[in-house]
Image (spheres, helix red, strand yellow):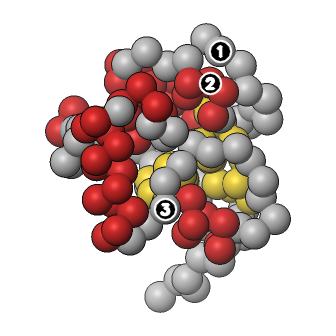
Amino acid sequence: MPPKPTRATAPPHLLFVYDADSGLFNTLADMGHKLFSPATYGCDLCLLTHGVLREKAQWRRFVESLPVRCEFLHRDQFRRRHPGNGTPLPAIFRVEKGECLPCIGAAQLRHCTDLDQLKEWIRRHCLANHPPSHREESS
């Protein structure tokens, strides 16, 4: 049996970090905020990938079709796991050799108009065969 991969030897994967905290109370508060005041809701990644009550089916199918493992964390979970990472959230990272490399940042997500555009950006910026960009740029 081959040895279990370590963080340094694990294959690259994508890490999606929402700018919302975990837990039942926070989830209910977020649902209310999205329902009653979506224009002021702070997590652009959440708005693109989730409806008021659940994840969008189109998003789930896209994630399941990706050729890499995907992991999803809330802000508080990410900050506990990566306390030195001050990247503005929400963000999407390509994780290689245990290092979180931002491939789509908060500024870019603010300018994303719909789920189709997000999917294209993920294909282009997170799955390309070149190292992910450390800068936030709009397409």
Q: Secondary structure at mark 3?
A: loop
* Residue 125: assigned label: none
Q: Position of residue 119 (x, y in %)?
A: 41, 26
Quadrant of residue 56 in the image?
top left
Q: Position of residue 103 (x, y in %)?
A: 65, 36
Give the alpha-carbon distance from disc 2 to disc 3, as whole Å. Answer: 21 Å
Q: Position of residue 109 (x, y in %)?
A: 55, 28
What is the crowding at mark 3: few (fewer than 14 residues within 10 Å), some, or many (at least 20)?
Answer: some
| Residue that label 1 marks | 138
Q: Secondary structure at mark 1?
A: loop
Q: Position of residue 86 (x, y in %)?
A: 78, 54
| Residue that label 3 marks | 21
For image coordinates 28% across by 36% down, the residue present is 36
For image coordinates 34% across by 56% down, the residue present is 29
* Horizontal side of residue 98 vs 60, given as left or right: right
| Residue that label 2 marks | 108
- Seen in the picture, residue 72 relative to 119 is either above or below; the reply is below
* Horizontal side of residue 97 vs 121, given as left or right: right
Residue 120 in view in this figure = no
Q: Secondary structure at mark 2?
A: helix
